[in-house]
Image (cartoon, rainbow, N blue to C red):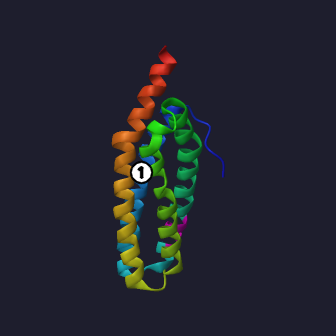
């Protein structure tokens, strides 16, 4: 996978839209796990994994790069801290995939993943994306 070639404002809009979709997908995965529908769950988890992997590539290759360029390393610590959660998020997805045959463990992992993703996305949407976008647009205009 490679980063998508979009202008920063378009990429941020896309990433925020994808946040909503992944939250919905996680909710559906949790419901299916509780019901014991592991075939459909597996398909959704595979889609989620691919989506999250692409999402992480875009954020780290483009958003983080722009943040470092616009803010400098010292003022970018909070961005780096949030983006370090990517490894934990993808690890949860892989743990879940490995436990698909263990219903209760799988449901617990999905619940933890949902909590982590909700906090992660909230931080990106409320703080990181607006700050980077504002600096980017200010630089572009002049």
| Mark 1 neighbour density, 10 Å: few (under 14) some (14–19) many (20 or more) | many
* Quadrant position of residue 28: bottom left
Q: Is residue 83 magenta?
A: no
Residue at x-position 55% and y-position 67%:
46
Magenta stretch, residue numbers = 42-46
Residue 84, position in %: x, y? Answer: 49, 55
Residue at x-position 49% and y-position 81%:
99
Residue at x-position 45% and y-position 20%:
138
Residue 111, position in %: x, y? Answer: 35, 70
The residue to which callout 1 is attached is: 19
* Quadrant position of residue 114: bottom left
Residue 16, position in %: x, y? Answer: 42, 44
Q: Is residue 93 above or below residue 15?
A: below
Residue situated furthest front in the rendering:
74
Residue situated furthest right in the rendering:
1
Q: Nearer the viewer, residue 122 or 101?
A: 122
Q: Is residue 68 above or below residue 124?
A: above
**Residue 68 in the figure: left or right of residue 77:** right
Q: Is residue 63 above or below residue 96?
A: above
Residue 47, position in %: x, y? Answer: 53, 62
């Amino acid at each position: 996978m490679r980063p998508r070639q979009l202008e920063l404002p378009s990429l941020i809009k896309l990433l925020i839209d994808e946040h909503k979709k992944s939250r919905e997908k996680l909710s559906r995965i949790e419901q299916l796990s509780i019901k014991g529908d592991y075939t459909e769950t597996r398909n959704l988890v595979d889609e989620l994994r691919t989506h999250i992997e692409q999402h992480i590539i875009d954020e780290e290759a483009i958003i983080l790069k722009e943040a470092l360029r616009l803010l400098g390393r010292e003022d970018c610590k909070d961005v780096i801290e949030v983006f370090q959660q990517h490894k934990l998020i993808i690890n949860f997805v892989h743990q879940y995939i490995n436990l698909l045959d263990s219903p209760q463990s799988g449901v617990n992992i999905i619940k933890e993943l949902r909590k982590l993703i909700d906090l992660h996305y909230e931080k990106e949407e409320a703080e990181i994306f607006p700050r980077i976008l504002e600096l980017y647009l200010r630089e572009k205009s002049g």
